[in-house]
Amino acid sequence: MDEKLKAIYQCIVEGDNNGVQEHVRAALESGMDAGTILNEGLIAGMAEVGRLFEEGEYFVPEMLISARAMKSAMAILKPHLTSEQVGFAGRVAIGTVKGDLHDIGKNLVGLMLEGAGFQVIDLGSDVAPEKFVEAAKNNDVDIVAMSALLTTTMVNMKSTIAALEEAGVREKVKVMIGGAPVTEAYARQIGADGYAPDASRAVALAKSLLS
Amino acid sequence: MSNSSHRPHGKELLLAALRHEAPGAIPWVPFAGVHAGKLRGFSALEVLQQPEKLLEALLAVNELYDPDGQPVLFDLQVEAEILGCELAWAPFAPPSVVSHPLETRLELPKHLPEPDEGRLPMILETMRKMKEMVGEKTALYGLICGPMTLASHLRGTEIFMDTFDHPDFLEGLIGYCRDVNLRMAELYHQAGMDVIAVVDPVVSQVSPRHFKQYLLKPFTEVFRAIRQMGAYSSFFVCGDATKNLEWMCQTAPDSISVDENIHLPTAREITERYNIVIGGNIPLTTCMLLGTQQDNMKYVVDLLERLGAIDGIDTFKNFILAPGCDMPYDTPVENTVAVVQAVRDPATTRRMLANYESHTFDLEVTLPDYSRLEKPLVEVFTLDSDTCAACGYMLSAARRAVESLNGQVDLVEYKFTRPENVARIKKMGVKNLPSLYINGELKYSSIIPGNRELLEAIRQVMR
């Protein structure tokens, strides 16, 4: 790998916010293609962060600082990217379900999806089924992603799926779910298309749902 | 219950386990927080705010689930509320923190909770009453919010960035939270709590490196202080904290409690090296909330078998059976009753499950012709009324009512321990145990009827 790309990749993996900005600027000044910086530096770095999280090497703090570095780097890189280079893996509307205010997991999944080239519409926390429906209807969404931490709110995943069906948009979108009390079996039971146990595997799931 | 008289039971059993003895039985601690309310039809708001309802619900848990140890209140937001976090209340779950006073300021608070602040008056009052009413037979747990989780309540998700961006501030903030822990432990111990549990779910979200850097010292100091007070300590964690277990052991609590994200037999290999009791880890949703009675008995029996606790019970030590974390509000009562049966008599339960699962099982049973009975017939289906407290209560309620009717009504008990009864239970379509049927119709399941209510139900078929 090119030394400049290696440095960018390493800054993302280590969450070095200042370092990544310097190296991206330097790479652009040297005439390196913005698409290459994005794919081989930043996105590859975030994929490694995801892998380390999945393996139990990285935890929430490590992932958050890497996501912050990714975001700063993207702000510098974006004006240099052509529309094809921006890359578009799909559009995801994400939120915690009605009654649930615990959004750390949801935020991590959103950050990782963005890092992997998805456009993320963050509906926030405590999101009513109608709000998911509205987002699915009006934004040409590919995936509706729901999170719940509480055993008492996870049932609202089922009512959101019912609301999507009622509004006639269930067939248009894939539904993925996650959160501490949620399981693969529960996803099947309520008619979701998939379940992921963590942010890294949520990215893999989103990609496979759209492939 | 008849068997319990010659087996160690209750507080005696739990404290023996915490002293790392081999007490000859497995202690059981149901984490019935908001779920306690369900037993009396109270919402989470009612049991977490109203002392008389909390007490009534806790006594129901004590009666029905026959615990050796029991938490008084399971709510990690008590301290945060006192320290200025706003809470959003939910009808069937503990409240959530919605505002974080330190979200935008790097300031260290100084104020420590006083016994007249927030919900402490009602909590301390309930602790004292529980101590008075059941404290002789049941060990009582006071739960405090651990330093990392409390710091995250005060600071919000910025806390995770602080591990890298503001290490000195974070160390100071966690030090303050340790002081809050020490104050709370003291108040709860004075109110009669035998075990102080430091509950810190956020611990599973940080790396071993950060645990060592920020948490090793404050947790060690808290557990040392609890021991000096004369109480036992427990370190509760939720989520996959496998990688931090070794460091958690080095903080030297008397016990650690984990959920289903941690493989308990593997974790026990670590805790055994430190001679620390490990507790857990019945899965909250797949098993307790959504599973059947058989699923719950099977989980417990399989777990005890893997740990070597059924056949080697005489020398088995350092384990407490408990749910993974705070039980979901809507956990079916009969599922917990099944857990009690399994832990009180795992060997018999193992045979019961084998009978139930046996496909070749083909015993002929003839059900009574319920339309042509000479006398009304009360049938009580139990797991085993000698070991399962709820089953014993159901049978006693039936006996009392039937005896008062002076031979006008027949009563029969069918225990799940006998193969022919398993066949009968299947044929009758009995879903949950204990259940009470009158003339072949299901009248009560898991919840024990009052005498007057049951007599009225029997009299209705006598008319």
Image (spheres, rainbow, N blue to C red):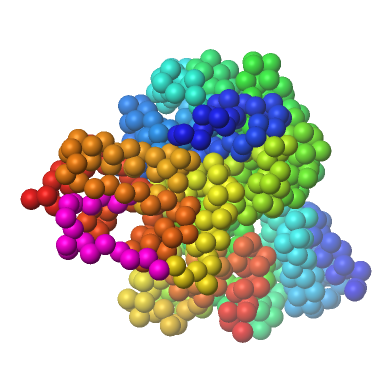
Towards the viewer: B274 or B92: B274
Eyeballing the image, is B419 above or below B176?
A: below
| Relative image position of residue A76 (x, y in whole percent) | 71, 65
The range drawn in magenta is B364-380
Point 59% across, 49% down: residue: B347
| Relative image position of residue B378 (x, y in whole percent) | 25, 50
Left or right of B33 on screen, residue B8:
right
Query: How many dots with numbers?
Result: 0
Towards the viewer: A98 or B161: A98
Point 79% across, 77% down: residue: A36
Point 58% across, 47% down: residue: B346
Left or right of B295 on screen, residue B330:
left
Residue A4: name its quadrant.
bottom right
Towards the viewer: A113 or B251: B251
Point 43% across, 39% down: residue: B389
Residue A54: name its quadrant.
bottom right
Is residue B342 visible in the rendered image? The answer is yes
Eyeballing the image, is B403 above or below A45?
A: above
Looking at the rendered image, the quarter that the N terminus of chain B falls into is: top left
Towards the viewer: B400 or A62: B400
Is residue B240 visible in the rendered image? The answer is no
Whether residue A140 appears in magenta in the rendering, the answer is: no
| Relative image position of residue B150 (x, y in whole percent) | 58, 35
Eyeballing the image, is B73 above or below B429?
A: above
Residue most extreme to the left: B463
| Relative image position of residue B430 (x, y in whole percent) | 36, 60
Whether residue B377 appears in magenta in the rendering, the answer is: yes
